[in-house]
Image (cartoon, helix red, strand yellow):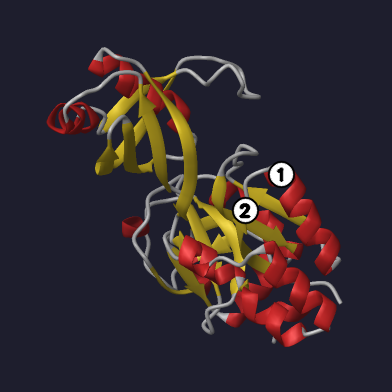
């Protein structure tokens, strides 16, 4: 039996994200993918997609992330001074990927939505960072040390949230293995989140059964098939769902939601990834 859904794994330190996802796929005998690569020595939330849920990857890769990081200062600095330096990194920041990174070391801009000092003991500083996907926390820790004028380096990092998924909702590799060895399919299924759980933060277009069938065949969604929708703008990612809340497809909006009336003619969105077969769309 193969599985489809999203599995939140508490990645341990040591293996790469690819290795962890591959182990899950081997245990559950399903095709897998993951979003938001974590370095081998970083732990925390790793979103693993199974079966058709792998098609969610482009969306999940854009999720905001939250991390708790421990950095070591290279000199003694008063806590008040560290707090003031940390606050300076809220907003748009320039970053260059660390030398150990696998991507090209080009200068990039990332947004840090929130950063706070959680604790400080001697030269060890614990911070929590809520940031845009693709932010390099290792580089951030180095830059904090430069602002302080003493230098610093990251010594520990844990991802505590990816989009709406929290570390409290994750499962360890041991828990997954135990369920597999017991042959407990109910336990495994209870760990899986349906694809609908991953699209909570993007606009929904609720469609009629006939439109769901047409979209599942690859047709462009027209307004006559739309029952209701959330606000969206042209070019934005949208989720096409059935009246029962089943994810039919991810798509791209072809016009602003304010510029069409549900039930009237005119193209609304084109599908980019379909999640149900035509037979399932008719159920």
Which of the two residues, 5 or 229, is positioned nearer the viewer here? 5
Question: Residue at the spot x=80%, y=60% of the render?
Answer: 25
Q: Secondary structure at mark 2?
A: strand
| Disc on res. 150 | none
Q: Residue furthest left?
A: 80
Which of the two residues, 69 or 133, is positioned nearer the viewer here? 69
Q: Secondary structure at mark 1?
A: loop
- The picture places residue 46, in percent across and down from the top left corner, at 59, 53
Question: Residue at the spot x=26%, y=12% of the render?
Answer: 149
Q: Is residue 71 visible?
A: yes
- The picture places residue 61, in percent across and down from the top left corner, at 55, 46
- The picture places residue 148, in percent across and down from the top left corner, at 24, 18
Question: Residue at the spot x=29%, y=18% of the render?
Answer: 75
Work out how far the residue at label 1 is from the one at label 2, CA to CA, in angstroms: 8 Å
Whether label 1 touches label 2, CB < 8 Å: yes
On the image, numbered disc 2 is attached to which residue?
11
On the image, numbered disc 1 is attached to which residue?
15
Which of the two residues, 264 or 109, is positioned nearer the viewer here? 109
Q: Quadrant of the C terminus?
A: bottom right
- The picture places residue 94, in percent across and down from the top left corner, at 37, 20
Instruction: Give residue 42's quadrant in the image.
Output: top right
């Amino acid at each position: 039996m193969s599985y489809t859904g999203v599995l939140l794994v508490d990645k341990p330190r040591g293996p790469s994200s690819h290795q962890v996802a591959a182990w899950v796929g081997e245990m559950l005998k399903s095709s897998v993918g993951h979003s938001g690569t974590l370095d081998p020595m970083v732990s925390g939330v790793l979103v693993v997609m199974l079966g058709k849920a792998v098609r969610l990857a482009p969306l999940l890769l854009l999720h905001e992330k939250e991390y708790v990081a421990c950095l070591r200062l290279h000199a003694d600095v008063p806590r008040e001074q560290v707090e003031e330096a940390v606050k300076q990194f809220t907003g748009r920041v320039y970053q260059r990927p660390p030398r150990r990174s696998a991507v090209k070391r080009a200068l990039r801009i990332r947004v840090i939505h929130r950063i706070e000092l959680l604790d400080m003991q001697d030269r060890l500083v614990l911070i929590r960072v809520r940031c845009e996907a693709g932010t390099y926390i290792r580089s951030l820790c180095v830059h904090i040390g430069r602002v302080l004028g003493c230098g610093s380096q990251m010594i520990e990092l844990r991802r505590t949230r990816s989009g709406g998924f929290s570390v409290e909702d994750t499962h360890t590799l041991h828990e997954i293995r135990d369920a597999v060895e017991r042959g407990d399919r109910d336990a495994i299924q209870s760990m899986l989140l349906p694809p609908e759980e991953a699209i909570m933060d993007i606009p929904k277009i609720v469609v009629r059964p006939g439109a769901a069938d047409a979209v599942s065949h690859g047709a462009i969604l027209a307004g006559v098939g739309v029952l209701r929708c959330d606000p969206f703008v042209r070019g934005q990612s949208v989720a096409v769902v059935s009246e029962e809340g089943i994810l039919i497809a991810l798509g791209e909006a072809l016009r602003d939601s304010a510029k069409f009336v549900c039930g009237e003619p005119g193209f609304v969105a084109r599908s980019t990834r379909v999640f149900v077969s035509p037979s399932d769309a008719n159920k």
